Image (cartoon, rainbow, N blue to C red):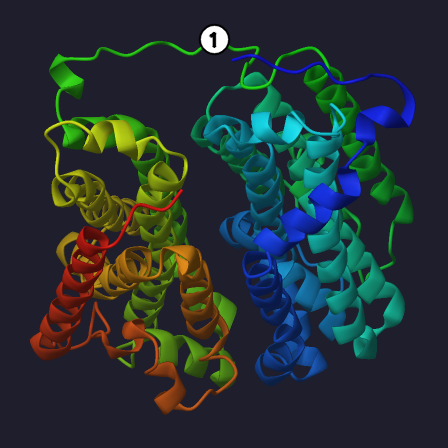
């Protein structure tokens, strides 16, 4: 593609940044508030929850002793550095809040850089009075606004536990978000595909989580070299509410500076639409001779990545099952929360049921991302050449939906196998516990199809639906949310397996509801014009 020359040097390379920033914030006016709000609510709900679970110094001391001797639990949530509610909050959700901030950062940056180039909109923008690096700067500033808002919410919300610790936790989580935002900025220069840019950055995030988990399982004080190699390890070693190590903030700051500089250098050395890594051309016939085959080619990497991740998560959670009884001990409040999430059929079965439910909630994020691939193909203009041939809209959509709904079944099956491997027994019941989550996952997928078919401009609101369901399932039982509120989530109607009684009525109803939502969405897609 032809690229108009842009004046270089000085501030002229940033011309138009303010306008592009306003435009990016307007485009993300739904995604950023929802994602940030869900993340903040998850963190801010923890002090009250933990106070109910570990209200006495003796209970907190017992928790710390268990974490010091249980490497599996440390791998999942990290070591405990203090017994205050603030320190326990940072321990319980700090790493996961950092992961959510990192995901938002990479999504925002890729959307406003490589996505814009892939769709051709960036070439139109560059034809105006816009500096060469203005788009990249606006994308990074958008990520900074999102992470800054999250840091402010956490600081204000946790100030009652101690302003210093609240600021440290908020700054640490925001720092992790910006580290992966700048990582995404580099990857967006290297690849020609937004899908590949998101996938590679997510792989880096997954590697960071694995490094942190491996390091924390080896030591109980976060001192492992593997922990220090991970930005998530930097967050826990900042030690909010436990004698803050302020110098640790220099690590994410230096990483953001170095990666941001590298991204700027790379952006100045390539043409719009081009990349440093060559794109391998695929065959036009044979395996890609149908719309379904093309959909599989586009989404197979995502299915593989999610499948591996769910299997490994299942192995970790399954391996923790035998230590749950020791961790809970005589804590009636903790036992009650687990039983509310997983049923009252015994602590082991309740824990397995609650872990299967949590994996189902995360699978809802997969199905939203997979269904929204239809939206991305449509808005980028790539769907038009496919539909210009002898391919109807329903056939084109069906290829992606089979992968979305079938892929959800596959990753939950792998999660069940992982739980069975980690637990060492109850293979059949554990598999059933994971597969019974599918009707609720499919309902979330059906809502996404409905939004894409009927209201394509609001299709990304499906992330808000999935985030609300995830938040409700994550903190609702611990906060004693009324059952009527929990029942707003499709997951609230599923039987609690293993150990509970299989209820085919709710499962059949949810499956029928998912089918109806998909049918309505496809009807809307067939009748409306394609969006661009």
Residue 377: % across, % down: 34, 37
**Above or below: residue 454 compared with residue 513:** above
**Above or below: residue 43 compared with residue 403:** below
The picture quadrant where one finds residue 527 is: bottom left
Inspect this view and state whether residue 158 appears.
no
Closer to the camera in the image, 292 or 337: 292
The picture quadrant where one finds residue 107 is: top right
Q: How many marks?
A: 1
Q: Is residue 515 found left or right of 234 in the rendered image?
A: left
Residue 76: % across, % down: 52, 51
Q: Quadrant of the C terminus?
A: top left
Closer to the camera in the image, 383 or 349: 383
Residue occupying the point 35% across, 67% down:
354
**Disc 1 packing (10 Å; few <14; some 14–19; many ≥20):** few
The residue identified by callout 1 is 278
The picture quadrant where one finds residue 485 is: bottom left
Residue found at the far front of this picture = 128
Residue occupying the point 32% across, 58% down:
448
Q: Is residue 149 found left or right of 360 in the rendered image?
A: right
Closer to the camera in the image, 287 or 71: 287
Residue 391: % across, % down: 12, 33
Residue 7: % across, % down: 81, 17
> For the residue labelled by badge 1, is the local secondary structure a helix, a strand or a loop?
loop
**Above or below: residue 358 compared with residue 174:** below
Residue occupying the point 18% across, 38% down:
396
Closer to the camera in the image, 304 or 108: 108
Q: Is residue 43 found left or right of 342 in the rendered image?
A: right
Inspect this view and state whether residue 57 appears.
yes
Residue occupying the point 24% across, 73% down:
496
Q: Is residue 216 found left or right of 510 in the rendered image?
A: right
């Amino acid at each position: 593609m032809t690229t108009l020359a842009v004046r270089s040097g000085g501030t002229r390379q940033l011309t138009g940044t303010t306008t592009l920033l306003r435009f990016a914030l307007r485009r993300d006016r739904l995604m950023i508030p929802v994602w940030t709000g869900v993340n903040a609510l998850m963190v801010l709900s923890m002090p009250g929850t933990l106070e109910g679970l570990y209200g006495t110094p003796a209970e907190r001391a017992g928790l710390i002793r268990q974490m010091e001797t249980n490497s599996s639990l440390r791998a999942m949530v990290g070591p405990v550095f203090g017994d205050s509610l603030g320190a326990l909050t940072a321990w319980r959700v700090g790493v996961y809040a950092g992961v959510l901030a990192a995901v938002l950062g990479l999504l925002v940056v890729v959307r406003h850089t490589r996505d814009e180039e892939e769709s051709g909109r960036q070439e139109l923008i560059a034809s105006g009075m816009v500096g060469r690096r203005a788009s990249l700067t606006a994308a990074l500033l958008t990520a900074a606004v999102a992470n800054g808002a999250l840091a402010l919410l956490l600081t204000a919300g946790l100030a009652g536990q101690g302003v210093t610790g609240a600021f440290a936790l908020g700054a640490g989580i925001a720092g992790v978000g910006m580290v992966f935002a700048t990582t995404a900025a580099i990857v967006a220069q290297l690849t020609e595909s937004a899908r590949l840019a998101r996938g590679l950055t997510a792989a880096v995030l997954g590697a960071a989580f694995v490094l942190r988990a491996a390091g924390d399982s080896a030591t109980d004080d976060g001192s492992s070299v593997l922990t220090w190699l991970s930005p998530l390890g930097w967050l826990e070693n900042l030690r909010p509410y436990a004698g803050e190590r302020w110098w640790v903030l220099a690590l994410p700051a230096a990483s953001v500076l170095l990666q941001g500089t590298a991204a700027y250098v790379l952006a100045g050395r390539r043409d719009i639409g081009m990349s440093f890594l060559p794109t391998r051309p695929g065959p036009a016939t044979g395996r890609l001779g149908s719309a379904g085959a093309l959909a599989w080619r586009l989404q197979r990497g995502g299915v593989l990545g999610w499948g591996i991740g769910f299997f490994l998560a299942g192995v970790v959670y399954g391996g923790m099952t035998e230590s749950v009884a020791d961790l809970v001990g005589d804590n009636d409040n903790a036992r009650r929360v687990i039983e509310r999430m997983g049923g009252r059929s015994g602590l082991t079965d309740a824990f397995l049921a609650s872990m299967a439910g949590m994996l189902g909630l995360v699978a809802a994020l997969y199905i939203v991302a997979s269904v929204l691939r239809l939206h991305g193909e449509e808005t980028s203009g790539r769907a038009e050449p496919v539909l210009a041939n002898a391919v109807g809209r329903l056939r084109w959509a069906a290829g992606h939906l089979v992968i979305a709904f079938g892929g959800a079944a596959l990753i939950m099956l792998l999660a069940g196998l992982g739980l069975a491997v980690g637990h060492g027994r109850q293979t059949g019941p554990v598999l059933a516990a994971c597969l019974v989550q599918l009707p609720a996952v499919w309902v979330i997928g059906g809502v996404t199809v409905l939004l894409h078919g009927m209201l394509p401009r609001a299709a990304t609101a499906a992330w808000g639906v999935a985030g609300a369901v995830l938040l409700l399932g994550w903190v609702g039982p611990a906060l004693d949310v009324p059952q009527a509120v929990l029942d707003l989530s499709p997951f609230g109607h599923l039987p609690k397996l293993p150990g509970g009684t299989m209820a085919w009525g709710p499962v059949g109803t949810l499956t029928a509801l998912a089918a109806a939502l998909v049918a309505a969405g496809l009807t809307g897609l067939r009748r409306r014009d394609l969006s661009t």
